Amino acid sequence: MRRWAIRGCAALAVLLLLAGFGYAWEAPGGFADRRLSSAMGLHAGALRIPIGRTPEEAVEKFRHFDTMRVVHREAVEGGVLLFIKRSMQPNGTDLQIEFVRHTWLGWKWGMGGGYGIGYGEPGETGVRTLLNYMTMPNKYPDVPGPYPLAVGELTDASISGVILKTSGGKPGKYAANVVEYEPGKRLWFVLLPGFASVPYTVQALDADGNIAAEKTLSDPVNDTGDIKTSANR
């Protein structure tokens, strides 16, 4: 009995030690936040990322957005991607993408970013905007996250899909996930392997699977923009 009691006490001590280390790692201002601060070029302890009960709460606590509407959730390794609309522009678009990590303490913001594009009055430039995009590279390889990735919205009903080709590093071809988050509103995204790098070629496909327009992206940092075609096409 004494032997079992000693073993039980030893196991409890190990569990308490692991729990203490886990708390020190994931608590706001802990080792994980210090690592991210260092990777971002900030002084140690600059980030104190709060814990949320849900991914949405984690983003709200960290970002302090005035308004946010989650239009899609995508489960990824280690957590979830939230696709967020913050304002509904009549002649433009905005999209925010936030990666939220799942920890034993709860949910924590991990990385993210967003963009907004205005188009002016429809038809005034003589071209049609088919889709818009934002690329997010793998800036911090030692920090958990589903990067690199490319995301955007389909802004023309004639476009049925998106293909992204990579030629930097190991060439590849990836079909985008397309999500209709409300009638007539669609977003697209591609989760790329960690080794993928620019240049990327983004192809907008018509209903028959033909290339309606394409664009090569070569900016190694976050890149945003759109792909257009002739209004008469």
Image (cartoon, helix red, strand yellow):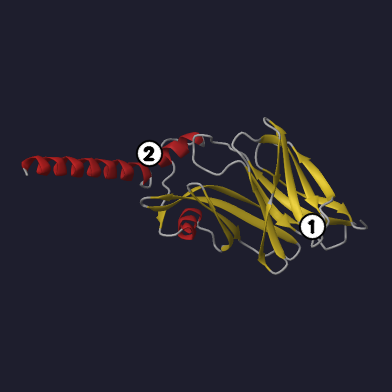
The image quadrant that residue 201 belongs to is top right
Pick out the residue farthest to the right. Answer: 232
**Which residue shows up at 46% across the image and 56% down it?**
58
Report the quarter where the N terminus lies. Answer: top left
Q: Residue at x 82, y 63 (%)?
A: 121
**Dividing the image into 4 quarters, which one contains the C terminus?**
bottom right
Q: What is the x, y in percent for residue 56?
A: 49, 60
- Nearer the observer, 75 or 37: 75
The disc label shown at residue 89, or none: none
Residue 99 picture location, percent across and down: 53, 50
State left or right for residue 86 relative to residue 19: right
At horizontal 80% and vertical 55% (from top left) the residue drawn is 130
- Report the Cα–Cα distance between label 1 and label 2: 45 Å
| Classed neighbour count for the residue bearing mark 2: other residues with Cα under 10 Å, few (<14), some (14–19), many (≥20) | some
In depth, the one of 51 and 209 nearer the eye is: 209
Q: Residue furthest bottom?
A: 183
Q: Residues within 10 Å of mark 1 (few under 14, many from 20)?
A: many
Q: Position of residue 60 (x, y in %)?
A: 49, 58
Say how many tags the image has: 2
Residue with the mark numbered 2: 31
Circle nearer the N terminus (1, 2): 2
Which residue is found at the position 79% from the left and 57% from the top? Answer: 159
Image x and y of residue 168, in percent: 70, 31
Residue type of the residue flagged with mark 1: Ile
Name the outermost residue toward the top. 169
Whether residue 116 is visible to the viewer of this picture, yes or no, is no
User: Dot 1: what SS?
Assistant: loop
The amino acid at mark 2 is Phe
Labelled pair 1, 2 in contact (Cβ < 8 Å):
no
Q: Is residue 10 above or below residue 118?
A: above
Q: Secondary structure at mark 2?
A: helix
Reading the image, the residue beneath label 1 is: 159
